[in-house]
Amino acid sequence: MIETVTKIDLPVDEALSIMKNRVSSGAGKRVSIVTGTHGDELEGQAVCFEVLRRLAEHPEFLNGTVDVYPATNPLGIDSITRGIPGFDLDMNRIFPGAEDGVMTEFIAARIVEDIRGSDVCLDIHASNIFLREIPQIRVNIDTARTLIPLAKHMNVDFVWVHAAATVLESTLAHSLNSIGTPTLVAEMGVGMRITPEYMRQLSDGVFSLMAHLGVWTGPVEAPREPIISTDGKVCFINAGASGIFLPAVEHTKSVAKGDCLGHIVNPLTGRTVDELLSPCDGMVFTLREYPVVDEGSLIARILEV
Amino acid sequence: MERKLIFELKSLYRDSLRVTGFTFGEGEKSACVVGALRGNEVQQLYTCAQLVNALKRIEREGGITPGKSILVVPSVNSASMNIKKRFWPTDNTDINRMFPGYNLGETTQRIAAGLFDAIKDYQNGIQFASFYIPGVFVPHVRMMKTGYENLDKAKEFGLPYIILRQPRPYDTTTLNYNWQVWETDAFSLYAGTTDTIDRAGAIQAVNAALNFLRKEGILLGSGRAHEGYISSVVEEEDLVNVKSAQAGLFESFCNPGANVTRGQLLARILDPCDASVRANIVSPADGVIFFAQEDPLVYANASVFRIIPE
């Protein structure tokens, strides 16, 4: 059943509504799937569709409640804007919001309140337009003990246990974890695009997790075993100069220390201005997608093996 | 005055981003002033430029205390300002959310690191800052309650108000916060507008900065002509937040600095098609308007005025 989480009038003849689709068998645990906080991250749109499609196909296997929130930032998605249009604000920096706050904070508070109490929440992100990511779950080290056992069911290749950062306390996931709603952050693909293969992989993960929780009694694919790693095992490669990035490796492939990851070239001079070499043996789980780079732009992240 | 390149970032086709500092006097690093960090901070750039102009004259006249030096950095983000963008042109990140920076990190982390490395050792730090909601403030000094804030020094600016703010998680990556962590006494000065020039506000902010520098003994002279105000200290949470009950066209009757009484009509929200009144916004308290939003279209629940209560 499609429900309105919150609704607020915009200045000129338009209402902003946050919607969810609740599919429920009555009793049982509750799983929430959330995406669309960044309006340019669309991979989660396909996952929401696929999860609802499979639930509708086999309602007899549902033993609980699934809430799907496909667009926490509907203005952003419909206007191809990463942040909240009109506010120039990253929505994932205003949680948990405030019931008596300005419009954006009010909406954030209503979203948190609506998701509160879920047995598990999955917050799906899709990198940005610049970087392509392998399907992964990101977990703050402070919540690792609770979340890693859940993340193992998500059928992802990689679980990144990252350090706590004060600035990340304003995210939806941190806010929900802080109030006792276990929330996993999925990152995959690239902004403004949908990767069908990843859509199927993460959707399988959602059903695997639901089966683990007893919310889904139908058949599921066995989840793949993820590599679980901390910040210390992740190498960052940044552009040493501004220019056009031409990759020499494929995303998700293994590289050896010293292998060439790509070049930054200057089309005006015809010269290579930077050669990017892998600092370690490992797997390229993040790779630059958008060719124009500034000095310092992130080119790749390698999971050291 | 010595002009010095603090940081340079080469671009593919555009000219380099150059962050330039202007140093006055010689000796210990006494005060640093930073202007526009964002591409829309034209008032902050204008104010800083006026300060550079004033300090040039003061230095020519021998008005800088021997053994003291002042660094002014008017513009940190010309790459955005020149194309009328608020944040970094390519990835839309905010330099003022990147401090203390990281010289091997992403682009705006490198810019922040390049700037911060040059300014972190100053005893006093002043930033001409802006607010994220379009609107106008009564000129004031803003400080974060980090445990390192120096309220007595803040009064030396002689601005009407000092606002104390409890830091939120996203504040921890701002220039002001990191200056304080690095033991610089840091102050943010709000001089009226952001993307338009408010000459009176800029003059007041420049005089406030000069007052401060005189009272700290960095500039010579008493500066009696520009003593300013005995500042009132206000905790940000004590400001009365006046919100819009409805969305629509915003018709305001009050400006920042105005005295208002409880029940006074401050603004109206009109239907955008027939001008019927959707909501009257009345003052919930006696006091002074501290902030007034400027956008002619208003969202519901928007903070349209902030009032310092009597």
Image (cartoon, grey):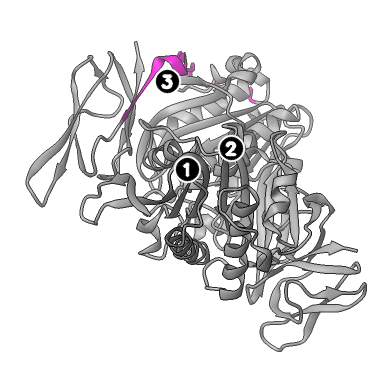
Task: Residue at 25%, 50% (x, y): give it.
Answer: B11
Taking the spot 67% from the left edge, 86% from the top edge, the residue there is B273
Using residue B39 as the reference point, say whether residue A273 is left or right of it: left
Residue A226 in view in this figure:
no
Boundaries of the magenta span: A216-237
Across and down, in percent, residue B15 comes to 24, 56
Residue B14 lies, in percent from the top left, at 24, 56
- Foreground label between 3 and 1: 3
Mark number, residue A231: none
Give left or right: position of A246 versus A34. Answer: left
CA neighbours of label 3 inside 10 A, class few (<14), some (14 to 19), many (20+): many
Q: CA distance from mark 3 to mark 2?
A: 45 Å
Quick one: which residue is furthest to the left in this view?
A270
Q: Nearer the viewer, residue B105 or A302?
A: B105
Q: CA distance from mark 2 to mark 1?
A: 50 Å
Residue holding disc 1:
A46
State which mark lies toward you, 3 or 2: 2
Residue B38 point in image, percent of width and height: 47, 56
| Numbered label attached to residue A157 | 3
Q: Amino acid at mark 3?
A: Asp
Of labels 3 and 1, earlier in sequence is 1
Quadrant assignment, res A140:
top right
Q: Is B125 in the magenta?
A: no
Residue type of the residue flagged with mark 2: Thr
Q: The residue tagged with tag 2: helix, strand or loop?
A: loop
For label 2, the residue is: B184
